[in-house]
Image (cartoon, rainbow, N blue to C red):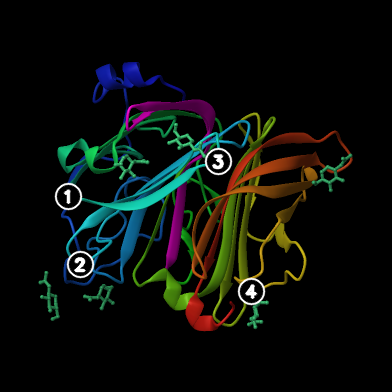
Amino acid sequence: MRTNVAAMAIGLGQLVSATLSSQSYVIPSGQINGTTGTDTIVGLTAFDGPHISVNNGSAYQWWYFDVVSHDSKAAVVAQFYPGWTADASAVLLNIVWPNGTTFAETISVGTLDLTTVDDGSQGYVEDGAMTWFGASDLSAYHLSLNLPDVGVSGKITMRSRAPSHVACGLNRAGASFDFAEFLQWGNSVPDSYATVDLDVNGTSLTFSGSGYHDQNWGQAAFMDGLTQWFWGHSNIGEYSLVFFYHIDEQLKVKSSGYLAKNGNLIVSGCSNIKVIPQGPRTSVPLNASIPVESWAIYIDSSKHGKYAFTIDNKIEASSSSPVYTRWVGQTTGGRVGAANSTGAAIVEFMNNPLKGYY
Ligand SMILES: *[C@@H]1O[C@H](CO)[C@@H](O)[C@H](O)[C@H]1NC(C)=O
Ligand SMILES: *[C@@H]1O[C@H](CO)[C@@H](O)[C@H](O)[C@H]1NC(C)=O
Ligand SMILES: *[C@@H]1O[C@H](CO)[C@@H](O)[C@H](O)[C@H]1NC(C)=O
Ligand SMILES: *[C@@H]1O[C@H](CO)[C@@H](O)[C@H](O)[C@H]1NC(C)=O
Ligand SMILES: *[C@@H]1O[C@H](CO)[C@@H](O)[C@H](O)[C@H]1NC(C)=O
Ligand SMILES: *[C@@H]1O[C@H](CO)[C@@H](O)[C@H](O)[C@H]1NC(C)=O
């Protein structure tokens, strides 16, 4: 079902035959002592709702949004992270300007009021620092930012162009949210037609591109079970690609590969993808001190053929080496043997420094 947001707003509770009852939550700023369960099964609560009950410093959850411009020159990432510190929640904001200038900062924010309607969530962070309105069927998102401390205000809209999914399948009742130990994942918007319209200290940043939204959560810190992960998403012509490669403490790989074409699923599964970092002296696990030039991605959908993509890292959007690096990339690829398309990507590398790969 595709419904435009204006119609949704009028029709809430009337036109929408919700399968889940609407719920309201308050997620206080900062960390709260306590224990929590974690949602592991799709369909019992809203897909984009809260999935743990306290952010206590080890148990975590976040709402992540990004948009990358079609020409791989500009990007905005906004992530709401409850309990980022003991005393405050945060918006992690990363901006890439078309001239290559980057901005990455963590901004302390207050309480989140959240309502879910069917699968969608609608969040309001104190003072409107960050708000989002997700359609009940996840077909559209409107995000707004109002962060006077860093001079940023404006909005981002997303109209989804690929079905929501979990690591090893689609968003279907009974599917598992599990990806790795202490790492659950729900990808509400794998790819979207997105527009960014921000005012940054009086200069406007506007572009259209590929938008993405997901959530991760877990009952303990995700670093506990991690050596490193590679994650990314891209829109390449008709294709929507999402990959996630998780290397645990024993160096065991868990992978997830998702590919759709014109909004129709080609594959969403856990043993169908290879992700290989490329560049002089690269290996897996990566040594965080060795730069990655590109990523080779191979997807084998047994039913619908084989696909190959290369994502060239174009801009380092944000880095706190050896832990974390994010790039804006340019992707080339498609079905093996057919003509290639190009597109834009966001890729990240997460590394657990305690494992010594740097
Ligand atoms: C949580 O527990 C720790 C350790 O017992 C204590 O120091 C801290 O004050 C508690 N925090 C809150 C918000 O209750
Ligand atoms: C946080 O919650 C998890 C899951 O219930 C629990 O194992 C952990 O001990 C809690 N941590 C704190 C600091 O309360
Ligand atoms: C890039 O553009 C931004 C926004 O106009 C500006 O603040 C920044 O100084 C520019 N960077 C360079 C290197 O010109
Ligand atoms: C806006 O300007 C302030 C003051 O100069 C600066 O601290 C802040 O980083 C700027 N915001 C962005 C997003 O560049
Ligand atoms: C298409 O892209 C893939 C992945 O980058 C590459 O391996 C392949 O050689 C390209 N094919 C053509 C015909 O350029
Ligand atoms: C990683 O690379 C750096 C720079 O070449 C090197 O000094 C370091 O020993 C390497 N670390 C590992 C674990 O191989």
Looking at the rendered structure, which numbered label has been put on residue 287?
A: 4
Instruction: Kindly identify which residue carries mark 3.
Output: 100
Q: Amino acid at mark 1?
A: Gly
Mark 3 and mark 2: span between their CA atoms?
Answer: 34 Å
Point 45% across, 56% down: residue:
185
- The spot of residue 343 in percent (x, y) is 67, 35
First reached walking from the N terminus: tag 4 or tag 1 = 1
- Tell me: is circle 2 under 8 Å from ligand 1: yes
Query: Considering the numbered disc 4 on the image, is that residue within a helix, a strand or a loop?
Result: loop
Q: Which residue is mark 2?
A: 86
State if disc 1 and disc 4 touch (CB < 8 Å).
no
Q: Nearer the viewer, residue 291 or 14?
A: 291
The answer to whether mark 4 is within 8 Å of ligand 6 is: yes
Amino acid at pointer 3: Gly
Structural crowding at the residue carrying mark 2, measured as other residues with C-alpha within 10 Å and reported as few (<14), some (14–19) or many (≥20): some
Q: Secondary structure at mark 1?
A: loop
Q: Which residues are magenta?
A: 182-211
Mark 4–mark 3 Cα distance, whole angstroms, equals 26 Å
Q: Earlier in the sequence, mark 3 or mark 2?
A: 2
